[in-house]
Image (cartoon, coloured by chain):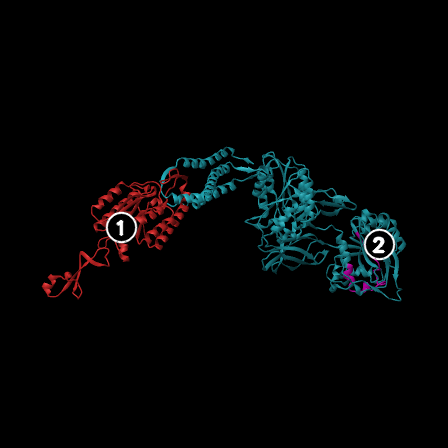
Chain colours: A red, B cyan
Amino acid sequence: MEGFCSGLHRSPHKGFSVEFKEHRQYVRGDEIRSIDWKVFGKTDRLYIREYEEETNLRCTILLDRSGSMGYCGSRNGAISKHDYAVRTAACLAYLMLQQQDSVGLVTFDTKVRRYIPPRSRATHLRAILDTLGRSKPGRETELGRVFHELVPKIHRRGLLIILSDLFGDVEELLKSLAHFRHAKHEIIVFQIWDPDELEFPFRQWTRFESLETPGNRRLVDPAHLRNAYLENLRLFREQLTAGCYRHRIDLVPMTTDRPYAETLASYLAMRRRLK
Amino acid sequence: MTLLNGILAIGAAAAAIPLLIHLLNRSRFRTVPWGAMHLLDSVIRTNNRRIRLEQFLLLLVRCAIPAMLAFCLARPVLTGWQALPGEVPSSTVLLLDNSYSMDARSNGKTHFEDAVDQAATIADQLDRRSDIAAIATGGSPTPLFDSPVFDPRMMTGRLQRLSGGFGANAAVDSLTSGLGVLGGMANARRHLVFLSDFQAADWQPLSGDGAARLRAQLDAMPIRPNLTLIQVGDEVRDNMSVDSIEFSKTALGVGQDLRLRVNLRNHGPRSYPVARVLLRLDGKPDSASQVALDPDSAAQALFTCRFDQAGSHVVEVEVEVDDRLATDNVFAASVTVLKQIDVLLVDGDPSSEPLKGETDFLAVALTPYTFGRVKLSDLLQTRTVATRHFAEDAIQEARVVVLANVAKLSDDQVSLLTDYVRDGGSLLIFLGNKIDMAWYNRALRSGQAALLPMAILSREGDSPEQRQGVRIVAQHFDHPALAVFNDRANGNLADAEIWNWYRLGTPEQATTSSPEETGPDTAMVMARLETGDPLIVEQPFGAGTVVLMATACDADWSTLPLQPVFLPLAQQVITTLATQVMPSRNLETGEPLVAVLPSESAGLPLSLTAPDGTRHTVRPVARGTQSVVQFDRTNRPGVYTLSGADADSIHFVAQAPRSESDLKPLSSEEMSRLAEELGAEHVGSADEFLELERTRRHGREIWRLLLAAVLFLMVAELFLQQRFARVRP
């Protein structure tokens, strides 16, 4: 299992690296150049120096910039889901580059808008942050089709981090995620929710205007719909959870009223415990 | 439908408020750019119709609440069955049951007091153009006013003075009488209201044909009145009554013992292990006894008393128990104590030898103490005269005249005898070997002198030598004079052998006298012989009675005078004859009170005191050799006392039938059936009647119903809102 946070993931492969691991006694067949002559000078015994090889993690962050991600709740100081996702992506990129992992970025709506291949140079962070800073929510989205398109673009197996609300056809989405899994990618999905979408707190007559499809507007008395909406929401989330579990995908819900650092920390802590 | 507060109905416009709020809400919506449209769209798509329906339903309920409230405040009245417009004057006849069963107490007052209060309530509510009449129904229908009154206060005042305790409720007569009164009343809207305890004994006989006839009467009226039955008082059953007093003698002399058998009945479910029974003579306590009565059972108490003075006396028996109805715990009876009964024996075959005369055995049998020289007084006093001495001076004092084997009488004697019997005297005729059969059949069975109950057809029997007698049939005797022989301990009439007798004509053959004096088929056979021939026959004549014996009263024709039974037979027949010609002084309520007085009393004012203390002045009317007082208003049970300036008081007792003592009311099913059969409404109080009347007059107010509907709608709105919206805080 590979990871993306320094000190949290160790490679099962020992190899050349700057990170010293241990000494062990020389046995016949070991390379002569591996002998630690300083120790021989002190102890008159032959010891071999062993180093730990670190993983060359290739992580690609997939940021959904569809219209639905532009929803900004009715609370004071609320930020849109897109902004929340951008900040989360920046945070993750920074963390991974800090530990010399390669980080790439894909922004998409109905198609891939921007693709930055994974790099591990520290200067790569600037490129990623620039792209994130320019990202704005667009209109419609087709997650399934976009993900299918991405599979051949990301050649090497690695970690895929999806930041999206996953609004769309669940079946098609799960198929595309399965496609990624087939390509040996590990997937973590951070599903971004606004609390309004989870609680549907509207009382008075409201006209809901679609953020993705202009002209799609509904004037309703939300109080009458709330039960049915919440039931529909429950079914949607159950479908997603069951599908992700089936494909061994981590589905991490995030709500925009909760600090992303907190959510990330608790998720990483959970991963550490599971190891 | 009409509205009593029509102006408030404008408030129904408030029904528009929820609609306006709804429309306002729809127009003042907020706009939300929404991302999760795919979740919302499917919800709207699948629930659109349901949501619209729910919203419409909720809106409807919300609109209905203010509309219904305004409608309720406007006091709507349903007038679907309104016969006439409101505020129409009406004519009302109140039938008020004042029978003594209404004296039963429940809820701290008597049912009669309750009925009076309810009647007063009804009278008070009438407007000034309405007329009202009232009829008391106890005993017989008695109108409280001669004509209907228009002043309710006059009616309520009269009702407050009305008293109860009368005889059985005359339901049918009262209803008929009420309909008659209603027919002559002023207004087209008419009510007949019966206030009663609806005692089963009074009302059960009315159910069925009686009710159908009454209903037909009601329906046949040009304007059909509304008949309403108001049941007063609660059901009470606990009651004991003194039902009757039986006397051992029909004629009582001074100093003679009178045995009283008092019949008591417990009508209720309560047991009385010890009930004290008190005997009062002329209002003074005389003796007491105790009886025990189980629920729904009868008992008897026995008393013996005697009177030291001749005249009219009152015997009163009271059972001292604390039951619900005290009125029937007392039973009174009038007892007439005679100084002596003068019997004139006309001997048709006198003899100077002892017991050879025709009337000798009879004289001994009628005055046994005198002949036996015993220090006891005989009630009867006999005088014997020969046929030729039978004249006006002889008959003057006689209560009973006996013709014993008299061959024939002169025309003057027949005329004298006829007048005597017609005016209330009693005649006993014994036949015998001396009689002129043809003369009897001619002179005593024709014209004005048709005294003979039956024609004398032929002489029957063997010659004295053969002595092959026949006996009297000892059957059950119905006649009061012979009823004593139904108990064999008092003697057996069949012990005597009759050798000779006259065959008498059948009663059908005997009715040849004028109908106005005897009436048809009035001859009654008191006793028969084994041959089937009548032996003793009785027939009323005028105000008197004639008894004919088909054999002789001496020992020539039978062994009857030699038998011990002859004495009680003679005593019973004579005393019965002597007393039954007197009009009874123990009456049923409503029965006319009649007193026979000497002829010199005619025209003199006499005072009659009724049980309630009111005094009436009555004047006797001359009738033949006597004068007669008659008083019809005896509806009230109790003692009526007739007194003159210089004469002893005569007491009469009017008793109500004891059927009123069984307080069991009609069951609710029976009550409903009766109301249905009569086409009447059955209500429990005057207030219910007035409500019913308001309904009939104005229609039914439905504001209570509407208020309930408003409350229901408010609850329904809350429920629907919760159910449809489920809005959580």
- Assess disc 2: are there few (<14), some (14-19) or many (≥20) residues with their C-alpha within 10 Å of its C-alpha: many
For the point 28% across and 55% down, the residue is: A270
Q: Determine whether, in the image, residue B273 is placed left or right of residue A266.
A: right
- Indicate the quadrant where residue A136 lies: top left
Task: Name the side, left or right, on which A256 lies relative to B712.
Answer: left
What is the three-letter code of the residue carrying label 1? Cys
List x then y, in percent, for residue B105. 57, 50
Q: What residue does disc 1 label?
A: A59
| Horizontal and vertical percent position of residue B407 | 88, 55
* In the foreground, B589 or B269: B269
The span shown in magenta is B545-570
- Describe the element under mark 2 as helix, strand or loop: loop
| Residue A190 shows in the view | no
Q: In terms of secondary structure, where does tag 1 sit? A: strand
For the residues labelled 2 and 1, the Cα–Cα distance comes to 149 Å
State if disc 1 and disc 2 touch (CB < 8 Å): no
Local crowd at mark 1 within 10 Å, few (<14), some, or many (≥20)?
many
Q: Is residue B4 magenta?
A: no
For residue B454, which numbered disc appears in the image? 2
Q: Position of residue A6 (x, y in %)?
A: 22, 53
Q: Quadrant of the C terminus of chain B?
A: top left
* B181 displayed left or right of A106: right
Viewer-proximal residue, B710 or B449?
A: B710
